[in-house]
Image (cartoon, rainbow, N blue to C red):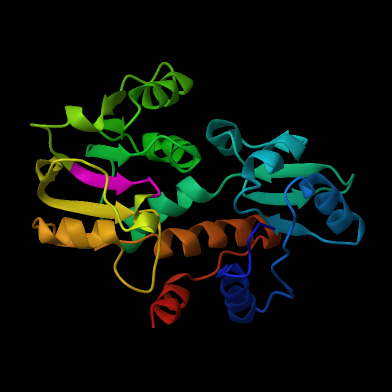
């Protein structure tokens, strides 16, 4: 469910998962008008629906509608995966962060533990990935944002974890990081956050949460500044979908064939 939702790759991804695993899954995109999410959710459930993926702009609405929340969802403050139990109660999870971690750690073979991480942006997408990233025990995570108060709000939301700190974009001079994640929407506007190129350590990974058929603006900019490893968010998209499929069906699909097919 989303608005708009016609562009979503999720029906193709879950159809491929179903074919691969032999699970009897029918998955389609459902366009929902703003303000009508809760009604659409209950109609889907009452018609016999089993599970939902939630995309923009309804992740906060899905969080509010969930009667049972996982720890990941509570940390994210948003829900992207819903299912119903035998009493028809709504359960909510957030698989975005574990999707990102799996793509970096397993698909790319890049450890997160002990690494210095810079995250650009302080919106909902960034909050959704912080918990699973912290669970990997990085050396530190710096959240940088144009409005530093929003970055500080995220740090405070994870109060007690001394590995998190906030910066303004203009406060990054002289610092370098092993993993730099773009969680802003700047790529949509063909722009790059105003950060110095020195933020990339030797052999750094540049990762854009957005995905595209071509290299994103952030990927291209990082490559122009000597970064050899840059990725868009397609792998994360497929991995978060695989986690949702596992929640619904109890079967974990193989993701690499699907990522390869979509890249092609």
Task: Tell me if 132 is positioned left or right of 230 in this view.
Answer: right
Left or right position of 135 against 14 = left
153 in relation to 73, above or below: above
Rendering quarter of residue 5 = bottom right
In front of the other: 77 or 85: 77
Q: Position of residue 106 (x, y in %)?
A: 35, 58
Residue 170 spot, x, y in % from top left: 19, 30
Q: Residue at x 63, y 70 (%)?
A: 6
Q: Is residue 127 visible?
A: yes
The quadrant in which the C terminus is found is bottom left
Q: Which residues are magenta?
A: 178-185
Residue 188 is situated, as x and y percent measured from the top left of the image, at: 40, 57
- The main secondary structure of the magenta stretch is strand
Left or right of 51 on screen, residue 99? left
Residue 180 drawn in magenta: yes
Q: Nearer the viewer, residue 77 or 190?
A: 190
Which residue is most to the front? 189
List the single residue furthest toward the top. 160
């Amino acid at each position: 469910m989303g608005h708009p939702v016609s562009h979503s790759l999720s029906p193709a991804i879950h159809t491929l998962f179903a074919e691969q695993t032999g699970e009897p899954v029918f998955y389609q995109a459902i366009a929902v008008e703003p303000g009508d999410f809760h009604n659409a959710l209950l109609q889907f459930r009452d018609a016999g629906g089993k599970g939902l993926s939630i995309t923009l702009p309804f992740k906060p609405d899905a969080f509010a509608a969930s009667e049972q929340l996982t720890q990941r969802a509570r940390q994210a403050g948003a829900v992207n995966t819903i299912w119903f139990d035998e009493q028809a109660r709504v359960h909510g999870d957030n698989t975005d962060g574990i999707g990102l971690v799996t793509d970096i750690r397993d698909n790319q073979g890049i450890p997160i533990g002990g690494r210095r991480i810079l995250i650009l942006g302080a919106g909902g997408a960034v909050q959704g990935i912080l918990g699973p990233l912290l669970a990997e025990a990085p050396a530190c995570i710096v959240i940088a944002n144009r409005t530093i108060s929003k970055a500080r709000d995220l740090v405070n939301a994870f109060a007690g974890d001394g590995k998190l700190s906030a910066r303004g974009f203009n406060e990054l001079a002289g610092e370098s990081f092993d993993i730099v994640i773009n969680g802003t929407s700047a790529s949509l506007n063909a722009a790059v956050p105003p950060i110095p190129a020195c933020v990339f350590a030797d052999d750094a990974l540049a990762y854009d949460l957005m995905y595209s058929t071509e290299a994103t603006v952030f990927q291209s900019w990082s490559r122009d500044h000597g970064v050899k490893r840059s990725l868009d968010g397609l792998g994360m998209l497929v991995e978060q979908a695989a986690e949702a499929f596992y929640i619904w069906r109890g079967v974990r699909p193989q993701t690499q064939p699907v990522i390869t097919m979509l890249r092609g």
